[in-house]
Image (cartoon, grey):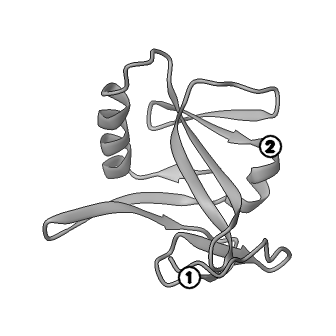
Amino acid sequence: MITISETAAGQLKSMLAEQEVPDMFLRIGVTPGGCSGFSYAMGFDDNESDQDVYMDIEGMKVVVEKENLRYLDGLEIDFEESGMTGGFTINNPNATATCGCGSSFRTALDAGKPNEEPC
């Protein structure tokens, strides 16, 4: 199960409304890389696959590839404003280590493929 806070959902819905392609949805995933081994991927998409799992979270269609669920189960997404900036924050209970910027992680059972690039 993935949780998106009301604040984050409001930001995402606003961004989604600006998209010019109809029927877009939020796709959340994991890619190899980053300084800790895996990087989060979050964006809008309109391509569906038979490998996708569909969820309705805060009134939004959210899609995750089946193979990524083991890394994202329990994921919490929030949006925080800080002074003149703001951004999405991710809390992943599966992560045993994260990088300083919070955009990459590894789990107890899978280290991913860390690279040398800084955050």
**x 76%, y 27%: residue:** 49
Image quarter for residue 66?
top right
Can you give x and y, in whole percent of width and height, for residue 23 in the image? 50, 17
Residue at the front extreme, as displayed:
117
Say few, some or many: other residues with alpha carbon within 10 Å of mark 1 (under 14 / 14 to 19 / 20 or more).
some
Residue type at the position of mark 1 = Cys
Residue at the right extreme, as displayed:
109
Q: From the viewer's side, name the closer residue of 118 and 57.
A: 118
Q: Is residue 56 above or below residue 88?
A: above
Image quarter for residue 47?
top right
Closer to the observer: label 1 or label 2?
1
Q: Which residue is mark 2?
A: 66
Can you give x and y, in whole percent of width and height, for residue 78 in the image? 40, 59
**x 75%, y 34%: residue:** 52
Q: Is residue 26 above or below residue 76?
A: above
Q: Is residue 40 above or below residue 105?
A: above
The mark tally for this picture is: 2
Say few, some or many: other residues with alpha carbon within 10 Å of mark 2 (under 14 / 14 to 19 / 20 or more).
few
Determine the CA span between mark 1 and mark 2. 25 Å
Q: Which residue is mark 1?
A: 99
What secondary structure is found at the residue carrying circle 1?
Answer: loop
| Mark earlier in primary sequence (1, 2) | 2
Q: Is residue 42 left or right of residue 70?
A: left
Residue type at the position of mark 2 = Lys
Can you give x and y, in whole percent of width and height, for residue 5 in the image? 40, 52
What secondary structure is found at the residue carrying circle 2?
Answer: helix
Q: Which numbered tag is attached to residue 57?
A: none
Q: Is residue 61 left or right of residue 15?
A: right
Residue at the top extreme, as displayed:
22
Q: Does residue 7 appear anywhere in the picture?
A: yes
**x 45%, y 15%: residue:** 22
